Image: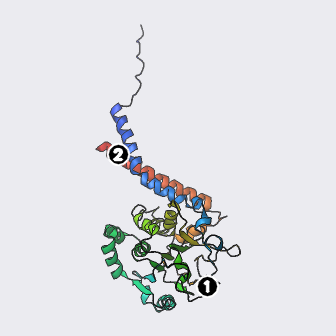
Amino acid sequence: MGVISRPARARRTHPVLFTCVLAAVALSLWCARFIFNDAWTLAALPVVWSHNSEKFLLSAESDGFDITFANYSAHQTSAGAPYDDRVPPTLHHISLGSGAAEHSKWAEVRQSCVDIHPGWEAMLWTDETAGAFVAEHFPELKEMWDSYRYPIQRIDSLRYMVLYHYGGVILDMDLQCRRAFGPLRRFEFVAPAAHPQGFSIGFMMAAKGNRFVGELVRNLREYNRHWLFLPYPTVMFSTGCHYASTIHSLQPNRVDLKILGGTKENPNLHRLNGRVSTPIFEHLGSSSWHSYDAAIIYNLGKSGSKWQVPVLAVCGVIVASVVVRRLRRRRRLVLRA
């Protein structure tokens, strides 16, 4: 008589272990929600930036403003009747670490803006004055500001803090002024358009305590992340132009957040890309902060680049692997607990 074998018992997952795994996954997703949210808002900029752009792009039709500046005197330092001067008469330049302010070339460039605005206050922010300013007026951000990996992050974030606290005009050291900013002082906020979307933070004008500039300061902590361990995206996404443009695109009402674009004949009229001449500036285009990865990423952004698809695919895999690794690490920590 043969031996009657019993059917193999179906392997069941222990209910306690299953519950722990589910809890770990849920906790990991909850902890990573800010990373996903930040990544999504940053990635969506090319799609959402132009939404209702006719309302925030400066134009003769919507604002009665001549963006070519042909109808304004080069020495006009005030908005002029019937407009009020919303932007204070203050020029801000920042020179941290590199000693750019002491270099005769940059000192001369800065002086061109000071000379064409007689009577305006001219503030030069150095390592000593900048650190003291952040400690006094934004103490909750001082530790983060000191710990930024790249010096340009301290410069960028300082732009927003200074502009929010004092108002006025913030300028890169390589911007040589061709005319006064008076006609633009009637607006709460103004910045030049950037390529291919968004705006440049190398030149900004704002009223003191401007709501949007306050949002730029408030979100610094939220977007303070290292992206793929590369300098260029880390700077651009945490404090740079892409970050600022993303916060701009998230505002419910962008009507008063004016962007200086171009004309049909010259869409790049006010863009500060490389060494260019605009109605307001001679941009000497130093780009001294750009690191080794900047040229690669810039070339990838050009349409038709043969490396665009494969490199972006590799980047996607890297991002996915980093996220999965972090989720697994968090899950193991929960299980050990």
Mark 1 Cα-neighbour bin, 10 Å: few <14, some 14–19, many ≥20: some
The image shows residue 323 at horizontal and vertical percentages of 45, 52
Q: Quadrant of residue 303?
A: bottom right
- Disc 1 marks a residue whose amino acid type is Tyr
145 relative to 109, above or below: above
Q: Quadrant of residue 59?
A: bottom right
- Disc 2 marks a residue whose amino acid type is Arg
Q: Quadrant of residue 264?
A: bottom right
Closer-to-camera residue (116/29): 116
94 relative to 244, above or below: below
- Which residue lies under the disc numbered 1? 72
Quadrant showing the C terminus = top left
- Which residue lies under the disc numbered 2? 332
Residue sitting farthest toward the top: 1
Mark 2 Cα-neighbour bin, 10 Å: few <14, some 14–19, many ≥20: few
Residue sitting farthest toward the front: 82
Residue sitting farthest toward the right: 265
Identify the residue at image location x=34%, y=81%: 129
Looking at the rendered structure, the secondary structure element under dot 1 is loop
Relative to residue 310, is residue 7 drawn left or right? left
Relative to residue 329, is residue 315 drawn left or right? right
Quadrant showing the N terminus = top left
Mark nearest the camera among 2 and 1 is 1
The image shows residue 5 at horizontal and vertical percentages of 41, 15
The image shows residue 160 at horizontal and vertical percentages of 43, 72
